[in-house]
Image (cartoon, helix red, strand yellow):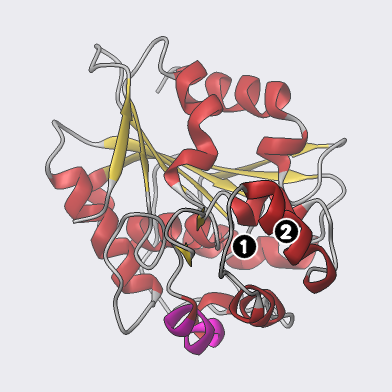
Amino acid sequence: MLNIIEHGTRTDLPGLLIAHGLYGSARNWGVIAKRLSDTRQVITVDMRNHGASPWTASHTYPELATDLAEVLKEQDGPFDVLGHSMGGKAAMTLALQHSDAVRRLIVADIAPVTYEHSQIRYIDALGSMDLTGLEKRSDAAERLKPLVDDPALIPFFLQSLDVNAGRWRLNLDTLGAAMPDIMGFPQIDTAFGRPALFLSGGQSDYVRTEHRPEIKRLFPNARFVKLPEAGHWLHAEAPRAFEATVRAWLDRPD
């Protein structure tokens, strides 16, 4: 079972499950989850091979979707589900293969397509970092700086570092081997007919116009919203706008 963090308690409104992206964790979503939990229960999860969840030898979207379905099986009734990036692909797969578990879907800055780029360079960077003798997170930041091409990602990566143990809370071996699966998307012929919001950053190119036919094939009731000031990390770059958009989508009448 995945490690979960619960925010708030069950109310008359459906609960919300949040699935993070690659290299992330349940803790990354703490601020958004806490704010949204003022009216409903919110559960954030560590995906497999991340955080405190089990490490496995494989990392495919059907497996990630089954992990999420097992979490929701323990809850009372269908949940709304929000997923970002890798978590968005897992959430889409969940909705397509375990539709009874999902009431409404929110997909943050990702499409159900195969991407040409790879995140393997960050696997290599994290794996090559010297973790011996670390005393504080700032020491780790200095060691990581020359290895990562985007300085803004360093604090994000360091949230998955156990400084005292000198280890990453990421299964770098499995994630590296599974990178083609992570960049891809499974062939699925079913459709999810309930409401689905595709929320993207206006400065990101992850969700393109040419992706819409495939999105509409799988999610015929999809709607599209952009946050113009945000990029791929829209929940961190425009948190208030992100929260307001998610809240409006969850609260709209059926």
Badge 2 density bin: few <14, some 14–19, many ≥20, Cα 10 Å: many
x and y percent of residue 142 in the render? 78, 58
170 w.r.t. 98: above or below: below
Mark 1: which secondary structure? loop
Residue at x-position 39% and y-position 63%: 93
Looking at the image, residue 191 sits to the left or right of residue 204; the answer is left
Residue at x-position 42% and y-position 10%: 38
- What's the residue type where badge 1 is placed? Ala
Residue at x-position 84% and y-position 45%: 202
Residue 174 magenta: yes
x and y percent of residue 242 in the render? 66, 29
Looking at the image, residue 106 sits to the left or right of residue 240; the answer is left
Looking at the image, residue 38 sits to the left or right of residue 117; the answer is left
Residue at x-position 82% and y-position 54%: 204
Q: CA distance from mark 2 to mark 1?
A: 6 Å
Q: Which residue bears the numbered disc 2?
A: 207
Badge 1 density bin: few <14, some 14–19, many ≥20, Cα 10 Å: many
Instruction: Pick the quarter of the image with the N terminus.
Output: bottom left
Dominant secondary structure of the residues highlighted in magenta in the image: helix
Extent of the magenta region: 173-180
Between 250 and 54, the one nearer to me in the picture:
54
- What's the residue type where badge 2 is placed? Val
Looking at the image, residue 176 sits to the left or right of residue 64; the answer is right
Name the disc covering residue 111, or none.
Answer: 1
Asked if one can make out residue 252 in the rendered structure from this viewpoint, the answer is no
Q: Are marks 2 and 1 in contact (CB under 8 Å)?
A: yes
